[in-house]
Amino acid sequence: METIALVGPYGADVLPLVEKKVGGRMRVKSVPTEADFPELGDVEYAILRVLKMNAATIGAMPRLKLIQRWGVGFEKVDIEAAGKRGVPVAVAPGGNATPVSELAVLLMLGVYRNIIPLHDGICGGRWEKEKYIDNSFVIRGKTVGLVGCGAIGIQVVQKIKAFGAEVIYYDVVRLPPEEEAKLGLRHVGLDELLAQADIVSLHLPLKDATRRLIDERAIGLMKPTAILINTARGEIVDSAALATALRSGRLRGAGLDVFDSEPLAMDSPLRGLPNVVFTPHTGGNTSDVNGDMVEICVDNIIAVSEGRTLPARVVVNSQFLPK
């Protein structure tokens, strides 16, 4: 009988959900920390969350057939080492699109409505009802620019449209014209998006081409009144350049769920800035969508187990797999 390992920390309901989905056809076990990696030697399938899987770890798994990411990021997997072993690395597009898109909108509102300083004021015994009027804004009538428009970005579009915003987007893979029309989207170049958007929201994977995509030059193209939202990956943004812009007033604010170093370093220049709303990489962390993610991950595992080829859009290391 083949074995699935849940590699990393998971909610208490995830292992029972996976067991129910496989229906006794496979064993399921938990490998919650890197200290437990010796238990991976008899595993055919790994559902990976949070932890890193390097070449040495992959090499110590002789029966491995698939690394399935819990989510869409794959930068913590040595995809080349896996490919050279003939092991596909798959992602789960759309599995956490709802909670991440909701958090992106929450961060927009948190920055625009000064939620953190207002909350802290009440906790400190202050009633600052009028203090932030001149620095409070609505989303209606603003231009929201999405950098990347996959499953998460599309859900952001649907939510933001309900606020009455205009939405533009940049993606190296453009949506079909009929989908753009249905969503009410306009595709523009990256520089044009940065110059036009009141809210810039990032929804793209971390690759060599996207690392520090939002650097000093890119930030310099943005409006001084603009805010930056990042629920994608921290390394997409040059945090030092962002901190300088936020501190100087070059940008109005930022809402950040991800960072180039996690946990956020105590000496990070972003700490202590009053115009930033932080969350600790919790975009997909809601218990009520675990079932959605389990469905996607286990369906991919079953497909590989039955000898079927996974769709090209979910396999991120095709270039390294044997032809």
Image (cartoon, rainbow, N blue to C red):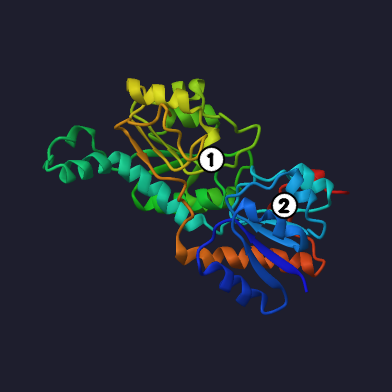
Residue count near mark 1 (Cα–Cα under 10 Å), binned few <14, some 14–19, many ≥20: many
Q: Along the line of sight, which residue is nearer the eye, 258 or 7? A: 7
Give the image location of residue 296, x and y in percent.
62, 64
In the rendered view, does 21 fall on the left or right side of 304? left
Q: Along the line of sight, which residue is nearer the eye, 160 or 316? A: 316
Q: Is residue 301 above or below residue 93?
A: below
Give the image location of residue 90, x and y in percent.
69, 54
Q: Residue sitting at 55 percent across and 34 percent down?
A: 235
Q: Along the line of sight, which residue is nearer the eye, 286 or 251? A: 286
Q: Residue sitting at 13 percent across and 39 percent down?
A: 128
Give the secondary structure at mark 1: loop
Residue extending furthest toward the right: 323
Give the secondary structure at mark 2: strand
Q: Are marks 1 and 2 in contact (CB under 8 Å)?
A: no
Residue count near mark 2 (Cα–Cα under 10 Å), binned few <14, some 14–19, many ≥20: many
Give the image location of residue 121, x and y in percent.
17, 41
Which of the 4 image quarters holds residue 66?
bottom right
Q: Which residue is mark 1?
A: 233
Give the image location of residue 92, x and y in percent.
62, 57
How far is the residue under mark 1 from the one under mark 2? Answer: 19 Å
Q: Quadrant of the N terminus?
A: bottom right
First in sequence: mark 1 or mark 2? Answer: 2
Circle 1: residue type: Arg
Q: Is residue 138 visible?
A: yes
Which of the 4 image quarters holds residue 229?
top left
Q: Which residue is mark 2?
A: 89
Q: Is residue 304 above or below residue 89?
A: below
Q: Is residue 113 visible?
A: no
Circle 2: residue type: Val
